Amino acid sequence: MAETPPTRQRAQRSDARRNIEAILDTSTACLQRNPDAGMGEIAAEAGLGRVTLYGHFKTRAELVDAVLTRTVTEADQTLEGLDLTGDPVLALAALTSKSWIVVNRFRGVMSAAQRELPADRIRDSHDRIMARVQALIEHGRQTGAFRSDLPTEWLVATAINLMHAAADEVTSGRLDESEAGLYLVATILSAYTPSGRIVPTLKS
Amino acid sequence: MAETPPTRQRAQRSDARRNIEAILDTSTACLQRNPDAGMGEIAAEAGLGRVTLYGHFKTRAELVDAVLTRTVTEADQTLEGLDLTGDPVLALAALTSKSWIVVNRFRGVMSAAQRELPADRIRDSHDRIMARVQALIEHGRQTGAFRSDLPTEWLVATAINLMHAAADEVTSGRLDESEAGLYLVATILSAYTPSGRIVPTLKS
């Protein structure tokens, strides 16, 4: 018996979705290995023709954007389980360590995005993650653990940029990836400490 | 009386040098206004044909590299007069403020470089400036003013990246350029404060 058109349409849409997921998986892996990987290389790796790949993503920028969006969404889900309502210093240490693990895992995708997409687009893709950092900073200000003399937005930018700086340092071999998490916690924590207050010491 | 060939050669070299300086002046101005300015736009602004411009710089990357090199050399000269041998906290504040003025003035060139050149090339162009920051950090460690629990190289990367972060924030309108210098001083100073020590308060 022939399928009814609506069922067939659903099946086609579901196939298309699976194809796109497979392309994004392969693209993520390619960009991780080589942030400059081109559309030809990605198509070959995915076992597709270039024309088929361009059928799904009109430009390399569109593809990199889709990979970035998926990566950042997954990163945000990883951070969802963290309880950030307790001691702000410990919460900042936990959020920083866990974020670093994700940033480090997706270093290649991030470099590809930095080269291909406008800075504002990259920033917008991080908005949910930035909202977590922002909420934690505001909590820490209320308890007096974090400084109130600089705008929250600047403190958020500080944390995000130091994460990316650490990723660049690891990529270029100047920083050991196993140590970067601790350095980031120490650096961001002291950067958030109010003037006139003691920089907290964390047991490692 | 005809010029002797060596004199003529010298005159030609001197003309070529002046032409290149004029191209670099125009390119700097163009990239400042629009970091994505193309070779056609730069040639037109310089009153040259594209072929002539390509005769001097084979690719856009080569031109951006030359603009970056000249900009960073000038920046380094601006920092030359600073005495960094006194109180490390005051010296860091002075070096940061003065560096910010230069970074802010050349925001467009920096964005153009970040999009066109490999990260390592940009880093290498900063090596003299990084050497100043490094010497100051080492001086501050000896007096106990700055932390010794993180590698000097990471502390240098922190300062340089926060400068560029501030430039991005100003460019996108989220940070007022007149306040960025103070924020940078406060942030870098606290980031360098050892655990267990009080973050210094600066009179503004």
Image (cartoon, coloured by chain):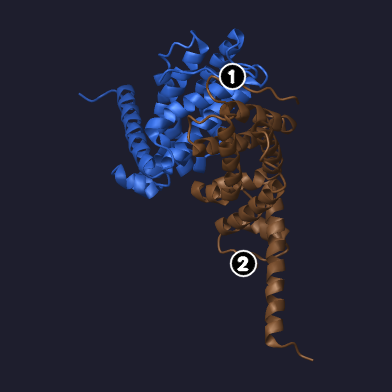
Chain colours: A blue, B brown
Numbered label attached to residue B104: none
Numbered label attached to residue A193: 1
Where's residue A81, x and y in %? 40, 13
Disc 2 versus disc 1: nearer the observer: 1
What residue did someone put label 2 on? B56
Where's residue A203, x and y in %? 42, 18
Task: Name the side, left or right, on which B140 lies relative to B9.
Answer: left
Residue drawn where x is 60% and y is 65% of the image: B54
- Name the amino acid, label 1: Thr
Q: Chain of mark 2?
A: B
In the image, residue B35 sits, relative to residue A142, either above or below, namely below
In the image, residue A90 sits, relative to residue B75, either above or below, namely above
Where's residue B97, x and y in %? 70, 36
Q: Secondary structure at mark 2?
A: helix
User: In which quadrant of the rendered view does residue B132 lie?
Assistant: top right
Task: Name the side, left or right, on which A8 lies relative to A201.
Answer: left
- Name the amino acid, label 2: His
Decide which of B105, A41 is in the foreground and name it. Answer: B105
Kindly indicate whether the residues beneath marks 2 and 1 are on one polypeptide chain: no
Disc 2 and disc 1: Cα gap in Å? 51 Å
User: In which quadrant of the rendered view does residue A170 lie?
Assistant: top left
Residue drawn where x is 58% and y is 55% of the image: B65
Q: How many neighbours does mark 1 have within 10 angstroms: few (below 14), some (14-19), or many (20 or more)?
A: many
Can residue A71 be seen in this snapshot?
Answer: no
